[in-house]
Image (spheres, rainbow, N blue to C red):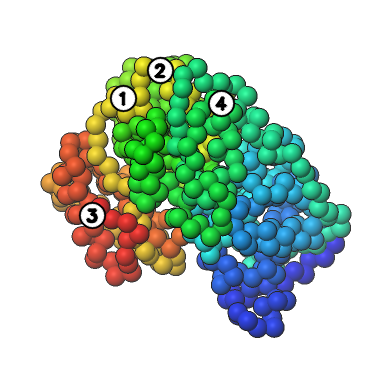
Amino acid sequence: MTDSSPRPRPEVARNTWDELREPMIDPAGFREYDVRWRYPDQINLPGLQLLGLGIGTQMHEAGLAPRIVVANDYRSYSLAVKQALSIGLMQAGVEVLDIGPAVTPMAYFAQFHLDAPAVAMVTASHNPNGWTGVKMGFDRPLTHGPEEMARLRRIVLEGQGVERPGGRLTRVDGLREAYLDDLTADLRLTRPLKVVCACGNGTASAFAPEALRRIGAQVIERHCTLDYDFPNYNPNPEALEMLRDMAAAVRESGADLALGFDGDGDRCGVVDDEGEEIFADKVGVLLAREFARAHPGAVFVADVKSTGLFVSDPELRELGARAEYWKTGHSHMKRRVRELGALAGFEKSGHYFIADPIGRGYDCGLRAAIEICRMLDRRPDASMSDLRRSLPRTWSTPTMSPFCPDEVKYDVVARVRARLEALAASGGALGGRRIADIVSVNGARAMLENGAWALVRASSNTPNLVVVCESPDSEDEMRAIFADLDAILAEQPEIGDYDQKI
């Protein structure tokens, strides 16, 4: 046993002799609940090997059996990243169960299917090409939270990795079939459903069309040919570019709905039969109604970016359902769903955390798609647009992400929160509506007197802030709320351009 792992250099020296030998890792890549870097500019392959050694060391510290599921998304460099990570895990004396290319929820499923105590999924998630990362977890279905990430960061950056004998790599085949079987075993549609399946040429292309066909849907493929150059757009069903392409496909084909999946398949976006985008939090309310009918009094968790309908929807209230708003982020949400014994959790970004007895508690875009189809199958006379119109009307912005450097974004949010708190204390307003309260569980969510709200928080994954606004009264009010919040954000010099803006 050796406990002298090197300390990585904090910057990557590109095109140098040392780049091919010495670990180089930008410390900013260690985030709240996973790791993300631009590759190879912020981490090199020896750095990824050191990360694997760190994860393996942490597994031994936690008293886990030394077996871990490892997989990678479909990007040109993800295999190299996974191989370097696997070498480090083997250095730590861990058996690597390599299940090959996968969507992230297939890796989570493999933990259960193979009875493995740990998982490390190489993926940049919905980030554009040029990014890589790892989602890891030791307590299925949970993934690392802030405490686990802080310890992993210290192990890796302070050279605390411990080499042990006994590591090996085992190739495991058949997981794709087992995962698809698990998803589709209990549903055969009784009504004809024509579904646009949009994958943005990402990893879900190898899974989603087949899953939908297995349940009996007529599938219209939209960019479902695997292509890691993403020639049409970055697969991100929260982005208006992808949602609008899905809407165009619905109008062209006369489909009943469109289902879109992000780069690693753990998120799902929806467009209805009229070509209207339904943001995932609103779809979550529809699914919560569906689940609560079978499980009266069910508890749900919604992230702070989500619609206020989780607590105000008359149908959910009548069914005795209750909801809690919680921190955004897949690890935060999974953990809170389990702590509360909730039936499901929902994020505006398109993560759905469907727990026992329906799912296993991890976020799976394909499981969400299956449950949406099941909901429509139970209502043969209702369209997706009918279900959308059954919700109380609100007007919401898409998720908007202005640039803000990683090293200052939390300080910037703290200043904005203080500014909003002072505004609220003085009887101030956004969009002409008085601020009634500031919810600070994750950033600052300004609750307005009529149930409208405005949120600003720091992105956990990228150098950005996250901004969302909603009004129960009108689009004009929603836009006015955003204009006032945007003016407050403009006071902070570190905030840059938005990725998209209303």
Q: Position of residue 17 (x, y in %)?
A: 69, 83
In the picture, the disc for residue 485 is 3
Marks 4 and 3, how far apart at CA = 45 Å
The amino acid at mark 4 is Ile
In the picture, the disc for residue 215 is 4
Picture residue at 59% right of the left edge, 70% below the top: 40
Tell me whether the residue at label 2 lies in contact with that at label 3, contact meaning CB atoms closer than 8 angstroms.
no
Marks 1 and 2, how far apart at CA = 10 Å
In the picture, the disc for residue 386 is 1
Mark 1 or mark 4, which is nearer the start of the sequence?
A: 4
172 sits left or right of 275 in the view: right
Mark 2 or mark 1, which is nearer the start of the sequence?
A: 2
Tell me whether the residue at label 1 lies in contact with that at label 3, contact meaning CB atoms closer than 8 angstroms.
no
> Badge 3, how many Cα within 10 Å: few under 14, some, many 20+?
many
485 sits left or right of 237 in the view: left
Mark 3 or mark 2, which is nearer the start of the sequence?
A: 2
Marks 2 and 3, how far apart at CA = 40 Å
Residue 454 at least partly seen:
yes
The amino acid at mark 1 is Asp
The amino acid at mark 2 is Arg
Between 375 and 296, the one nearer to me in the picture = 375
Picture residue at 67% right of the left edge, 78% below the top: 19
